[in-house]
Image (cartoon, rainbow, N blue to C red):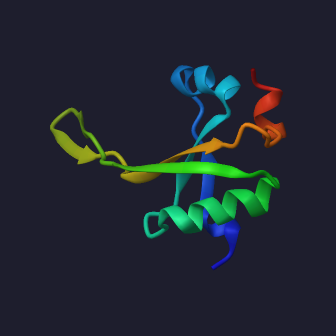
Amino acid sequence: MVSQDIIIRPILSEKTYADIPNKKYVFEVAKFANKTQIKQAVEEIFSVKVASVNTANVYGKIKRQGKNEGLTGSYKRAVVKLTADSKSIAFFDSLS
């Protein structure tokens, strides 16, 4: 499995921006990926040291438009915390 297939995109919100100085980053990841695969993928792509990974399945919400009803997409997200001596991820440095 290729690392680029595991990390889909960063999740950027006000809450995730607040954790960037603490070296916590949030990513949308593949649903089948486990914590070990996520850790290896982040270390390989961004050349950093990962201390811990927390994952959560985010289920889609019911949305309506008129009489039609459907679900938004479900995904898995991972909160990645880097070690204290690790460098930060350069992509997120320009955002904070």
Q: Is residue 73 above or below residue 32?
A: above
Instruction: Estimate the x, y position of residue 20 in percent, counting from the top left.
Output: 67, 28
Query: Residue at horizontal 78%, vertical 51%?
Result: 48
Question: Left or right of 70: which side holds 1?
Answer: right
For this rendering, which residue is in front, 35 or 27? Answer: 35
Instruction: Estimate the x, y position of residue 7 in percent, counting from the top left.
Output: 62, 58
Query: Residue at horizontal 69%, vertical 57%?
Result: 42
Question: Left or right of 91: which side holds 78?
Answer: left
Query: Residue at horizontal 49%, vertical 67%?
Result: 33
The quarter of the picture where residue 17 lies is: top right
Instruction: Estimate the x, y position of residue 88 in percent, counting from the top left.
Output: 79, 37
Q: Is residue 86 above or below residue 36?
A: above
Count of numbered marks: 0
Query: Residue at horizontal 27%, vertical 40%?
Result: 61
Q: Is residue 61 above or below residue 74?
A: above
For this rendering, which residue is in front, 47 or 32? Answer: 47
Quarter of the image where the C terminus is located: top right
